[in-house]
Image (cartoon, grey):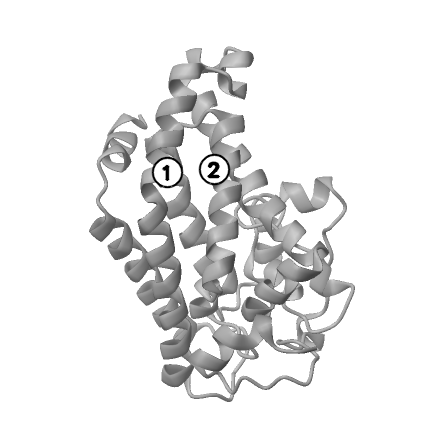
Amino acid sequence: MFDPILEFFSEITSLQRGGLLALGLMFFWIIEGFLPYRYLNYNKFKHASTNILLTLTTILVNFSLAFMIVLTCDFISASEIGILSFFNITAYPILSLLVSIMILDLIGAYSAHYFQHKIKILWKIHAVHHSDKHVDTTTANRHHPIESVIRFLFTLLAIIISESSIEIVFLYQSLSVAFSQFNHANIRLNDKIDKMLSYVIVSPNMHKVHHHSFMPYTDSNYGNIFSVWDRLFGTYMELDREKIIFGIDDNYDDKNNFLKILKRPFRKS
């Protein structure tokens, strides 16, 4: 059932991966206009242009380092030292796919995100993402280039531990981008539907809590695709949507300027 999908991702080109990202962005951008989570008083196009420039730096980093994913997947496949081989999960294709994606999400997304909040020097870099005062779907890839490298290294670690194949890694990365665009999007779902979704995946309401300016909510809801990690490790929190204030409570105003945003991690506190 999954063979055609995996075959597509085993041969996916950089242009196709970029195209999927752009399609997702356009889709949720349009939906935001019909089902807004909050009516944001901002210049939507100027805001998007800055975030898209940051997205392009993320694409540049990931595509430049993609060869390392290929080499790592080839090495771990030949070595057979990952979890899939250790527990003989490779004999069950669907289970292998699910376990691989969950480990990639746990280590490559949740763990990477958690440590960026807990280690001061990493937080300064990650703060670029949190500095957005108008969270929408373009915020999903609003990352400093250094953060893109950090997340990439966590992904390599996840590949080694899980023993994921190249097609599963590229499938996961595409899913990760789509889910991130979805849960950052300025869209309002029915509260009951959003709550139901949050038991399995990271819903928009759930992730918006993470973008609240004040602790302890900023240090919660780290998940990207699966919400189980936050519930399992005690980092899940809820907050009334009307009380959420986006951005960072500090004295640095980057005015959504691309160059000032790049300089943010290196400013004197």
Residue holding disc 2: 156
Residue lying at 26% horizontally and 33% vertically, measured from the top left: 10
Residue 142 appears at what percent x and percent y?
47, 67
Instruction: Identify the mark nearer the N-term, 1 or 2.
Output: 1
**Which circle marks residue 195 in the picture?**
none
Secondary structure category for the residue under label 2: helix
In this view of the protein, can residue 131 be seen by the observer? no
Residue holding disc 1: 68
Three-letter residue code for mark 2: Leu
Would you place residue 43 above or below residue 231 in this image? below
Three-letter residue code for mark 1: Met
Which residue occupies the foreground of this view, 164 or 78? 78
Residue 109 appears at what percent x and percent y?
55, 47
Q: Are marks 1 and 2 in contact (CB under 8 Å)?
A: yes
Location of residue 266 by image quarter: bottom right
Location of residue 133 by image quarter: bottom right
Which residue occupies the foreground of this view, 157 or 202? 157
Residue 14 appears at what percent x and percent y?
24, 49
In this view of the protein, can residue 103 be seen by the observer? yes
Residue lying at 53% horizontally and 78% vertically, measured from the top left: 134
Q: State the CA–CA distance, disc 1 to disc 2.
A: 8 Å
220 sits left or right of 21 in the view: right
Would you place residue 240 above or below residue 45 in this image? above
**Crowd tier of the residue under label 2, counting other residues whose Cα lies within 10 Å: few below 14, some 14–19, many 20 or above:** many
Residue 150 appears at what percent x and percent y?
52, 51
Q: Quadrant of the C terminus?
A: bottom right
